[in-house]
Amino acid sequence: MIYKVFYQETKDQSPRREQTKSLYLEVDATSELEGRIQARQLVEKHTNYNIEFIELLSDNHLEYEKTHADFTLTEF
């Protein structure tokens, strides 16, 4: 399962939509909820990011992201 994680680079300032960034994680999970939990744990363990939202990408959405965004899987 591929998840898109929306985040702010710091927890010290109020979130601003214009500063929201995203990364993509591949998580081996049995359910969407378990995958979201694992994705959050990975990001929190390895960064100081302020996570805003975690989204499971459907097949169609994943194909769109691969062609229209700066798509690279993040590995920790």
Image (tube, helix red, strand yellow):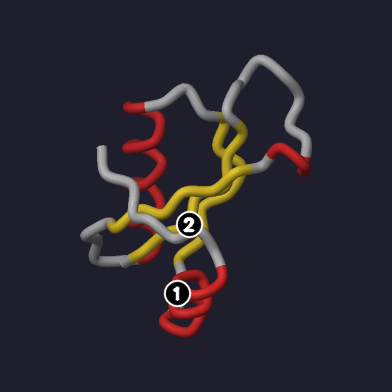
* Residue 40 at x, y percent in the picture: 41, 41
Locate residue 8 relative to residue 75 in the image: left or right: right
Mark 1 neighbour density, 10 Å: few (under 14) some (14–19) many (20 or more): some
- Residue nearest the observer in this picture, 7 or 53: 7
**What residue is shown with label 1?**
62
User: Mark 2: which secondary structure?
Assistant: strand
* Residue 43 at x, y percent in the picture: 39, 36
- Under mark 1, the amino acid is Leu
- Residue nearest the observer in this picture, 57 or 41: 57
User: Mark 1: which secondary structure?
Assistant: helix
Locate residue 41 relative to residue 52 in the image: left or right: left
Locate residue 37 relative to residue 48 in the image: left or right: left
Residue at figure coordinates x 58%, y 49% from the top left: 53
- Where the C terminus falls, by quadrant? top left
User: Which quadrant of the view contains residue 15?
Assistant: top right
Up the image or down, 26 lies above or below 62; here it is above
Give the label on residue 4, or none: 2
Whichever of callouts 1 and 2 sits on the residue coming sooner in the sequence is: 2
Residue at figure coordinates x 41%, y 54% from the top left: 24
In the rendered picture of this protein, how many numbered marks are placed on residues?
2
Give the label on residue 5, or none: none
* Residue 37 at x, y percent in the picture: 37, 47
